[in-house]
Image: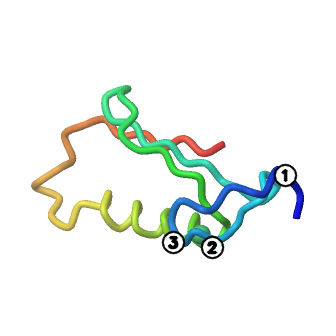
């Protein structure tokens, strides 16, 4: 093994090379509240969860914060 083993995915813990890594940063009102380095599979899951959670079920109850997602 090389001395610079890939860092694991933050979600599933699988070794993850930089070439495959996706880093997501979630910010609310310009404050970073979450940052994760994910493999492509977990990244897809994360996006699915994000979109599900950020979609208001009731349009009379809108999300008040300004939420941004940044993907490197
Ligand atoms: Zn993963």
Nearer the observer, 51 or 1: 1
Real-space Cα distance between discs 1 and 2? 26 Å
State the SS at label 2.
Answer: helix
- Single out the mark in the foreground, 3 or 1: 1
Which residue of the protein is positioned furthest toward the right in this rendering? 2
Real-space Cα distance between discs 2 and 3? 6 Å
Q: Which colour scheme is used?
A: rainbow
Q: Do the residues labelled 2 and 3 touch (CB within 8 Å)?
A: yes
The residue that mark 3 highlights is 45
Q: Position of residue 15 (x, y in %)?
A: 70, 66
Classify mark 3: residues with Cα within 10 Å, few (<14), some (14-19) or many (20+). Answer: some
Q: Where is residue 9 in the image (x, y as percent from the top left)?
A: 60, 62
Q: Is residue 53 left or right of residue 21?
A: left
Residue at figure coordinates x 31%, y 29% from the top left: 29
Query: Which mark, by number, is residue 41?
Result: 2
Q: In this view, does 8 lie to the left or right of 56?
A: right
Q: Where is residue 19 in the image (x, y as percent from the top left)?
A: 82, 54
The reply to whether the residue tagged 2 has its Cβ within 8 angstroms of ligand 1 is yes
Residue at figure coordinates x 35%, y 68% from the top left: 52
Q: Is residue 25 left or right of residue 30?
A: right
The residue that mark 1 highlights is 3
Q: Quadrant of ligand 1?
A: bottom right
Which residue of the protein is positioned furthest toward the top in this rendering? 30
């Amino acid at each position: 093994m090389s001395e610079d083993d890939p860092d694991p995915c933050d979600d599933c813990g699988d070794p993850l090379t930089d070439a495959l890594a996706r880093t997501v940063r979630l910010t609310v009102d310009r404050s970073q509240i979450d940052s994760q380095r994910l493999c492509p599979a977990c990244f897809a899951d994360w996006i699915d969860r994000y979109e599900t959670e950020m979609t208001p079920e009731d349009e009379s109850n809108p999300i008040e914060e300004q939420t941004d997602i940044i993907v490197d």
